Structures are given as C-alpha cells and as structure tokens.
Image (cartoon, helix red, strand yellow):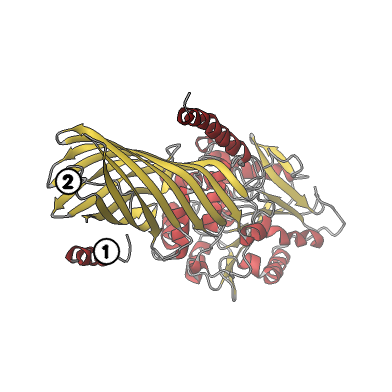
Amino acid sequence: MTRLALLVSVTLVLGAATSARAQELNLATTSTARPSIVEVRTGVEHAFLGEVGYRHVLDLGHQQLFVGGDVSLPWAKVDLDDYRVRATVGLPFGWQHWKLAGWLSPTLRGTVNAVGEMTAIGADLRLTGGYYARGWFVVAEAGFDWVAATKVTFSYAYRNQVYSAARDGWYRTPGGTTYAGLHGGVSFSSFDLVLRAGNARTTALEQQTMPFYLTVGVNVTL
Amino acid sequence: MSTKSWNRTALVPVLGLALALGATACLDPDAAGNLVPATVDEDPSLPRIEVNGTALHAEAFGNPGAPMIMVLHGGPGGDYRSLLPYRALAGDGYYVVYWDHRGAGLSRRHPASSYSLVQYLEDLRQVIERFSSSNGQPIVFLGHSWGAMYATWFIDEHGDYAGRVAGAVLSEPGAFTSAGLRDYLDRLLPPWGLTSEELNDVLWADQFMSPSSQARADLVQAIRVLPGSPKEHNDPDNPPPFWRMGAVINTRLLEMALDRGFDWTAHLGSFPHKVLFLRGELNENMPLAHQQELASHYALSEVITVMGAGHEAIWEKQDQFLAHIRAYLAEIGVAPMRDAGGAR
C-alpha cells in the first residue's frame, strides 16, 4: 500500500505530463522475483509528451526477457486524438556489468491535424549497450522507429482549401525516425530515476522538426 | 511432419503473402496526385512555361500587348491560386501574368542543392521576357508578402529595367534586409504558443509522414501552414486557398538568404516611380511602423491600411485592394489597353 501510494505520488509529481520509449531499465536490478515494473516518463520526444508503461520480467533460464507496453500522449494540449501505443519485447545479454539488449516494439500511432486524420503502424527496433551497476547505469542507444504504413483521411479543410482530389487510404513506408543517444540513471530502493537524450532524424537522415529528444522518468519496481 | 511444424511452415508464406498484398494494396505517398496535386512535370494539362532551366506553372490573362501586371505570390514556396481574383485587371485592359516560382506551387521540383539566389532572381527576369510582347511594354509588380520582397529584390537589382518597370504594389512585405528578415521571423516563429494544439499537431506529425520526398515534404508543410498564425489575424472562416506548398524551396531560400546576408535597399532610393504599400490593419507581425520603415527606402511611396483584415487582406478584401490598385495605376499613368484579349 505504501509502495502504491508512493507510486501515485511520483506519478502526480511528474504528472501533468509524462515520455519516451521505456526501455531505460537498470538491468542490474531487474529481477524475476519482483517482475512488475511501472514506468512514467515526461519530456520532449517529437512533441512534449508523457508516457506510462509497464514491463514484466520473465525468466528464460540464464536470461531475462522483458515484455510489456506503454501509452504516450503529447501534452502541450491534452488531446486524445494524438497518441502512441506500443507493445515491447526486450532481450538483454552480456556479462557482469556490461550488457547489450535488443528491443522490438510494434507501434500504433494516431493524430488529427489540419490536413486530416492519420493512423500509423510500424515497429521500433532499438539496440542498447552499457554499464549497469546496482546504484547507477549509463547506456548508449540507437534505434530505427519504422513506419510501415500510415492511413490518411483528409480533412474537409484540406480538400476545400488545398486539394479536393487527395486520396484517402493507407500509404506504404511513409517515413519514420532514426535516433541515437544516451540514457542513464540512479537506482535506489524500488526506483530508477532516468535521464535520456539524443538526436532524432528521419529514416533518410533528414532533420526532423524536433531534432532531439530529452526525457526524464521514473521506474518503480512493484 | 507433425501438425505443429506444418503450421509453422505454412505461416511463413501466409505472412509473406499478407505483407506483399498489404504493400501492393497501399498507396504510394510519392506517386503524382495522391497526397498533393501533380506538378507541371506530372500533369501535362497544366499551363506551363520553360525558362532558365526549369518548368514553371504559369498563365496570363488579357491582351498580351497591354501593360503587364506581374503577379508575385507569397511564401517563399507558395502559389498564385489565392491571387487569381486579380485577373479582374485583365478585364480593365491589363495583361495579368501569374506563375508559381521555381520549386513552388505546381512548378517543377528540384533538389535543394540546385537552388541559388542568382538563378532565382534571374527566373523573374526571364519570366518577364517570356511574356513580353515588346521592349517597351510597361510592367507593374503586384506582390504579396514574399512576392513583395521578390519585387523589391528585382527593383534593387535592375532598377526600372530600362524604363519598363513603372511601379509596384506591395502587399505586406516582410523585410528588405537579412537583419530585417531575422527580426520578422523572430516575430513570426513559432506562430503558436508552446501549449497550443497547433504546435502539438505539427510536432507529432513527424511520426506519420517524413519529408523524405518533395510530395511528402509539401504535405508536411501544409500541416504547418493550414492552421495559420494567430498574430496575423486572418479570417479563419475564409482562409486563402493554395494548390501546393514548396517545402524545399521555402527552407532553402531562407537558408541561403540568411546565410549569405542581403540588403535589397541600396538602390531603391533611385527608383523613379511611386510604390504603393497595402497592409492589413490587424497583422501584429507587420504593424504600420514596420511597413512605413520599409516604404521609406523607396524615394516615392505611400502606405495604405486596409481595415478589418490581417496579413491575408489581399485575399479577404479583394474589392478594396482592386480599388486601390486601379487608383494607383491611374495615378502613375499606366493606362489600360481597352481592346479585348484572352488567356495565353
């Protein structure tokens, strides 16, 4: 109960917003004995966004496997039309304090803007590698957040003001994000405090509107 | 073969087939006409001219021998669609020329690295020549926003062009120097507050459509442009239409201009004709003092404020604009040619 109250408090403190892809775990402290981890993030990633996620630690014998999911919303103005939902599976391996991990996150996104309503499906493949101690960790990361297809339903405004013959439908491989950066944090009790930052570009390596990401978050092991 | 292994073996081609069907059933975001209208290279039915190594979406109205009204759209990267009401001047007896600038509107797209300021300015001179019927045909510029800056750039470089440029109507130019442009962009950008839905939408959209082709970049640009800028105070119920934004030329031209620096005021004082500035009363980004300061670089100028409109007054208050333009043309002595003429 105390732990739950603490979690709620932390959530409220971070609260008005939350971000990031929640693969920023301290792999030195994760355990199948306490397999449930709740994550809360906030910061800048594409937009000002918040994220709440859950990871479950599974035992593969000599190895851990992470499964879970997260939901992200941009919070510059709360708008449930804009969202990102992801499932994640992660497999770390390594020796002593040094570990590598691969993370795969099938992703569903939605947005409504002046041009129309957009829904995108894709997958984020991320590789992480770094040093994990009981009290802290620092990790390099690189990933490819690929959009397989985006469904576009053009708005009345776009058809009326710009292009009446625009074609509604699913558009294949319309883009995505490549990113590289660092994350790290400190761990104490049941918590990780995590900072994550890096550079984001399109899959063709052009600059994005928001060329960087910077998030802070908390992981709580239940 | 066990049932389980058969199932796994069958799954691979089934999934492969599903992916292949999905891929072929999906639309190509870069195919002509899907997300944004086709350019002159993709739609041969569009009116076009070829000058200076590019193909431009262009058309003209009126008697080709009449005094020329050279219409220059905004942007950079916009198009002339919202300025088409001014073809009414063709009915008055003027030859009204429209064109989408290089890389903009429905004109041909080029790689970003191919653009240069010299080439861009030369385009305007060659378009003038392309539509001219004689070396003495008078020209009056009608430029909106970026187009008003483009006209000033031309005048600063070419003066009255051997006596041919008889005047200019400038609707809300942003700046005539790189320092002025930086100040203007500081006022203009970002057009929305940090907690606004518009900013949210623009930033979040990067995850759905990357600007990795001209078509996708132009669509992303439309996401940015369509909401408008609150400080410009345009009528949300009567937004100006456009065909297609030229995202690459928009970014590239501003980069080149700011990186290299420019001052288009050096020779304006010797331009011998009166220049008319028309501005919207409500635009916070271009208050009266701003337009008066720009106008002061010309030897002869007048600034007229059109009440009850913002930056897009040229679209929202067409009747008033036309009245001011007609009075101005009469004042500077560019008389219409009264015989009939058609589109060219």
Q: Give the residue furthest to the front.
A: B2
Q: Give the residue furthest to the right.
A: B339
What percent of the width, then of the height, locates residue A200?
Answer: 37, 44
The number of numbered discs placed on residues in the rendered structure image is 2
Q: Is residue B303 above or below residue B44?
A: below
User: Which circle marks residue A29 in the picture?
Assistant: 2
Q: Give the residue furthest to the top.
A: B1
Same subunit: marks 1 and 2: yes
Q: Residue at x 20, y 54 (%)?
A: A193
Q: Secondary structure at mark 2?
A: loop
The image quadrant of residue A49 is: bottom left
Q: Residue at x 50, y 28 (%)?
A: B6
Q: Is residue A99 left or right of residue B47?
A: left
Question: Which of the two marks, 1 or 2, is nearer to us in this view?
Answer: 2
Q: Give the residue furthest to the bottom.
A: B308
Can you identify the residue that label 1 sits on? A11
C-alpha distance separating marks 1 and 2: 21 Å
Q: Give yes or no for contact between labels 1 and 2 (Cβ–Cβ under 8 Å).
A: no
Q: Nearer the viewer, residue A186 or A92?
A: A92
Identify the amino acid type marked 2. Thr
Identify the amino acid type marked 1. Thr
Q: Secondary structure at mark 1?
A: helix
Mark 1 nearby-residue class (10 Å; few <14, some 14–19, many ≥20): some
The chain identifier of the residue carrying mark 2 reads A
The image quadrant of residue A76 is: bottom left
What percent of the width, then of the height, locates residue B147?
Answer: 59, 54
What percent of the width, then of the height, locates residue A67?
Answer: 33, 45
Q: Is residue B312 left or right of residue B323?
A: left
